[in-house]
Image: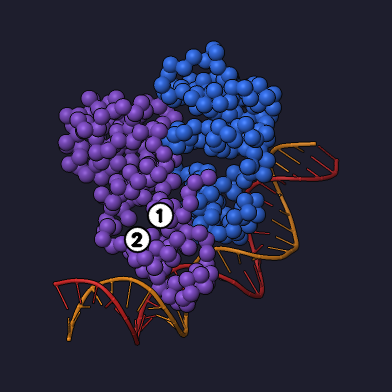
Chain colours: A blue, B purple, C orange, D red
Amino acid sequence: MQTGNSVIIHSSPIIQQGFKNILLARNIGITDVMVAVPEDMLLNSWKDMLILVETQFMDEIKEHAKVIKKNGNCIVGVETAGFFNRLDSCFDDIFYVYDNLDTINQKLMEYISGVSDVKSDNQLSHREIEVLTLVAQGFSNKQIADQLFISIHTVITHRKNITFKLGIKSIPGLTLYAALNNLVDFQR
Amino acid sequence: MQTGNSVIIHSSPIIQQGFKNILLARNIGITDVMVAVPEDMLLNSWKDMLILVETQFMDEIKEHAKVIKKNGNCIVGVETAGFFNRLDSCFDDIFYVYDNLDTINQKLMEYISGVSDVKSDNQLSHREIEVLTLVAQGFSNKQIADQLFISIHTVITHRKNITFKLGIKSIPGLTLYAALNNLVDFQR
DNA sequence: CGGACAATCCCAATATGTTGGTATATTATC
DNA sequence: GATAATATACCAACATATTGGGATTGTCCG
């Protein structure tokens, strides 16, 4: 599995995607939000990551928490119901799904002040993500060039780099990658 | 496919953003996901919209539900806890935050089949589904022809019919359609 | 029987994407 | 201050997709 700088382990796709949007929208150095399952946490050697874990999985990760934290990771619980007790848990903090935006921002600020510079590995650049997003929406290279105010040659170059970095050559493959990683941004 | 907008009325920003990502990432004609409060529902004259409402707000909108639905809107409840009873509610459907992706996709397909202008009896033939599946997997027309032991012309003809029947012209659009209908693997 | 449809095949013109180069300016990073 | 990464731009050749026609078989069904 690729290394990014944030992981969400949660059984609800809606909450997965919600955190993804919220984390990526803030300029706190998080460029990638992976979705994972509890088992991934035990097998992978993540470093300096923000790991969001549904509180119900606490028992499964409890005994490994120390090792995981030694690798510079920050483990934050995600609680839906609201009556989870943080004190006897292994979490550095708790996000409640019903937290308002101010609370979420404050907690995220605490996270970035506590973690050393996070570096993304072989990830796509911002511009490449933009191009991939538009490719996955079915726009032609010409249309993408017009939307980004760059020449079609630049779009083609970006696409070359994207296919090289991801190892995905086909448009359907890129589309599914974009859908799965929610790189698709329709907000404009 | 019809164009449509969507509104989410929910007190959790995480769930707001989660639905935003999930709705926009699918090619089901939703191009905008607004965030609103219950009062907006009573004041606005929305039409042909997918309105997602946190179930706790049901009482506030109950008496207006009939008028809202007359305007072509579809009101869907969003439930976090999981023990909301749909039968005596004003909702057309319920999204549970812990629904898995298959369930979400299925419910969304029901929504678009209810309001879209694509006729449900305009079904794809068996051969067309085979071709669509291979297209969504990234095979070229030539490769598809070889796999199905038919000429490339036949593949092209099938593709013309598919795009005509579905009203989806782009390969990414067809890919997401195939993913939504479980013709290709959408899981990690 | 005749109509609708599915599945098959063909052609030509045009549009679009891919590949393999090269190249420069700017900005991070060491 | 050097190096790496990013974003930008261009070209030519080739591959593939799209579009807009036309056509033949067989099957199912009223």
Image point (57%, 54%), residue name: A150
Question: 10 Å neighbourhood of mark 2: few (<14), some, or many (≥20)?
Answer: some
Disc on the earlier residue, 2 or 1: 2
Q: What is the secondary structure assignment of the residue under circle 2?
A: helix
Q: Is residue A44 left or right of residue B126?
A: right
Quarter of the figure with residue B170: bottom left
- C24 or A102: nearer the eye? A102
Location of residue A14 with respect to C24 vertically, above or below: above
Percent across and percent down for residue A61 are 58, 25
Location of residue B137 with respect to D5 vertically, above or below: below
Q: What is the secondary structure assignment of the residue under circle 1?
A: helix
Q: Looking at the rendering, in which quadrant would you find the N terminus of chain A?
A: top right
Q: Which mark is residue B166?
A: 2
Question: 10 Å neighbourhood of mark 1: few (<14), some, or many (≥20)?
Answer: many
Image point (43%, 24%), residue name: A80
Q: Are marks 2 and 1 in contact (CB under 8 Å)?
A: yes
Q: Is residue B95 left or right of residue A145?
A: left
Percent across and percent down for residue A46 are 66, 33
**Which residue is under mark 1?**
B177
Percent across and percent down for residue A102 are 47, 21
Q: Chain of mark 2?
A: B
- D29 or B44: nearer the eye? D29
Image point (22%, 25%), residue name: B59
Amino acid at the residue labelled 1: Tyr
